[in-house]
Image (cartoon, grey):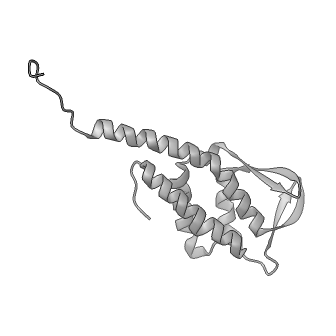
Amino acid sequence: MVEVERATFQQVKEAQIELIFDHIEKLEEQEETISPESRRVFFDLLALSTLGKCRTYRFIFRYNGNNYDLGYLSVFARKIAYLTDTDDKQQDIMLKGKKTKVPIKYLWKSLRENLYAPFDEALTLALQSSAELLKTGSDSYGFKPGTQ
């Protein structure tokens, strides 16, 4: 993972691509959980790809025609990293006060879908930050009076 002081648009975009295509989509397709060795990478990618913006979004889980609010996206995204594989590829989660078995692939799919809005917000913030760096980080050039 790259050390980042102030994330550029390109760094945020690359982190989003890696998080979705190299982690979440693969885990969804394979119906797997994150290995303990991959948790740190997942956490780093989550932080960089969202620039912390997922803490203001709710995690809405859509399952069997119902919507369930499972708390803050930032919390759920980290909790999912600690789920362990099961033989039946299902996880026990609380839905409206009732323990329910849910296929892990639906949790990954829902996480991916819930990340779209904070991803967009993070890209906008990174673009503004990148532009600010360009303005303040470059030398200013101009004409001397009377040379125009």
Quarter of the picture containing the C terminus is: top left
Q: Is residue 76 visible?
A: no
Q: Residue furthest right?
A: 98
Q: Residue at x 58, y 49 (%)?
A: 119
Q: Is residue 87 left or right of residue 78?
A: right
Residue at coordinates 57% horizontally, 45% vertically from top-left? 120
The picture places residue 60, in percent across and down from the top left corner, at: 76, 50
Q: Nearer the viewer, residue 22 or 98?
A: 22
Please name the residue shown 73% across and 74% down the image. 31
In-front residue for pair 100/60: 60
**Image height of 124 relative to 18, above or below:** above
Extreme-bottom residue of the structure: 87
Report the front residue among 132 and 87: 132
Determine which quarter of the picture holds residue 61.
bottom right
Please tell me whether residue 140 is drawn above or below residue 31 in the rendered image: above
User: Residue 87: image x %, image y %?
Assistant: 79, 81
Q: Looking at the rendering, in which quadrant would you find the N terminus?
A: bottom left
Q: Which residue corresponds to the image point at 75% horizontal and 68% vertical from the top-left?
A: 105
Q: Position of residue 30 (x, y in %)?
A: 70, 76
Left or right side of 118 for 98: right
